[in-house]
């Protein structure tokens, strides 16, 4: 499943279930970077108010640690939607050095190009990592509550099926660190969105009174994945809460919006060293 990696002052997670298939799959923490203030210290995102040069240093530190070129990252714009884009070698570097160059209008990326690293950014939303070890296809999806209610997980799987003939029975999915149910309070407006598309919404919500609810994005996304044909034994939740683990993770909710972002990274590599 997920295991911790220490490299000097860097601390990050890798997904062992994926690395066994010659795939690099990682999730960063907030530790080991050069950013300061509310972004202390390994902020990976260019779309927050951190200094760009510091973000690029942070990205370079992680890239060197995992053995890839920081200028090769492919990033999505991340608009809290459910659009998916298949990317190829021609997209190498999109969003790596400039947020405006990110793949526009999408929250999920898929590739079958060897050595092309996908990257996505988080501070409470659910990072979804996808791997089809048979067709050699990987993907990342950014699932906040809007992406979850619009079933970005199943949209990603559908595009893997259409683009690469992936079989859901072969696909493995990991859920990275994100906000847990105990700390994710939402109002009736959000729950009503889920009611419209999730008949079983009560399985991942808890009513607290006065139109306040706790929402379990982990369970909601697992439900979407299972409905899309992913076997429960191929779903790997990290069970790490970004809100609760303040030392390791940024949390948009905990910090009231003024914070940095962690990154999910995935790439295919025949030469990957376990």
Image (spheres, rainbow, N blue to C red):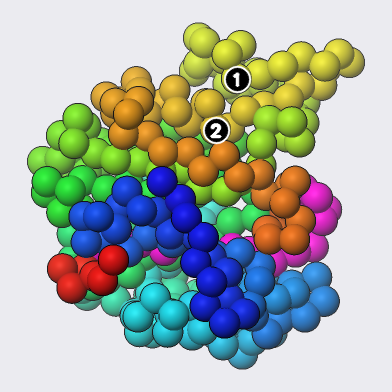
Q: Is residue 30 visible?
A: yes
Q: CA distance from mark 2 to mark 1?
A: 8 Å
On the picture, is 105 further left or further right than 216?
left
Residue hosting label 2: 218
Q: Nearer the viewer, residue 21 or 131?
A: 21
On the picture, is 63 further left or further right than 124?
left
- Above or below residue 20? Residue 241 is above
Q: Nearer the viewer, residue 210 or 14?
A: 14
Q: Is residue 106 visible?
A: no
- Above or below residue 37? Residue 104 is above
Q: Which residues are magenta?
A: 252-268
- Tell me where residue 129 appears, x and y as whole percent: 38, 49
Q: Is residue 41 magenta?
A: no
- Tell me the quarter of the image containing the C terminus: bottom left
- Above or below residue 56? Residue 198 is above
- Tell me where residue 57 appears, x and y as whole percent: 56, 87
Question: Secondary structure under badge 1?
Answer: helix
Furthest-right residue in view? 210
Tell me, yes or no, whether the two marked residues, 2 and 1, touch with CB atoms within 8 Å. Answer: yes
At horizontal 41% and vertical 26% (from top left) the residue drawn is: 224
At horizontal 21% and vertical 32% (from top left) the residue drawn is: 168
Q: Nearer the viewer, residue 225 or 192?
A: 225
Q: Nearer the viewer, residue 148 or 39?
A: 39
- Tell me where residue 150 appears, x and y as whole percent: 47, 32
Q: Residues within 10 Å of mark 1 (few under 14, many from 20)?
A: some
- Tell me where residue 68 appears, x and y as whole percent: 34, 80
The image quadrant that residue 214 belongs to is: top right
Q: How many marks?
A: 2
Q: Is residue 254 magenta?
A: yes
The mark found on residue 204 in the picture is 1
Give the mark nearest the N terminus, 2 or 1: 1
């Amino acid at each position: 499943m997920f295991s911790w990696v220490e490299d000097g002052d860097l601390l990050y997670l890798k997904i062992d279930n994926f690395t066994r298939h010659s795939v690099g799959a990682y999730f960063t923490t907030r530790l080991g970077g050069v950013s300061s203030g509310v972004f202390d210290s390994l902020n990976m995102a260019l779309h927050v108010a951190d200094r760009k040069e510091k973000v690029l240093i942070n990205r370079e530190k992680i890239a060197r640690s995992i053995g890839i070129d920081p200028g090769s990252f492919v990033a999505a714009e991340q608009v809290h939607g459910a659009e998916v884009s298949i990317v190829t070698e021609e997209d190498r570097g999109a969003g790596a050095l400039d947020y405006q160059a990110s793949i526009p209008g999408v929250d999920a990326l898929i590739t079958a190009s060897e050595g092309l690293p996908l990257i996505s950014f988080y501070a409470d939303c659910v990072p979804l990592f996808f791997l089809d070890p048979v067709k050699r296809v990987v993907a990342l999806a950014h699932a906040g509550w809007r992406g979850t209610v619009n079933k970005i997980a199943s949209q990603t799987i559908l595009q893997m099926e259409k683009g690469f003939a992936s079989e859901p029975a072969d696909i493995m999915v990991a859920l990275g660190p994100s906000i847990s149910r105990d700390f994710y309070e939402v109002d009736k407006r959000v729950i009503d969105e889920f009611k419209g598309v999730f008949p079983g919404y009560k399985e991942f919500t808890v009513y607290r009174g006065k139109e306040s609810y706790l929402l379990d994005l982990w369970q909601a996304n697992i439900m979407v994945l299972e409905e899309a044909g992913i076997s429960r034994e191929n779903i790997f939740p990290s069970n790490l809460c970004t809100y609760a683990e303040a030392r390791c993770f940024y949390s948009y909710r905990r910090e009231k919006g003024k914070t940095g972002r962690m990154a999910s990274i995935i790439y295919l590599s025949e030469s990957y060293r376990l």
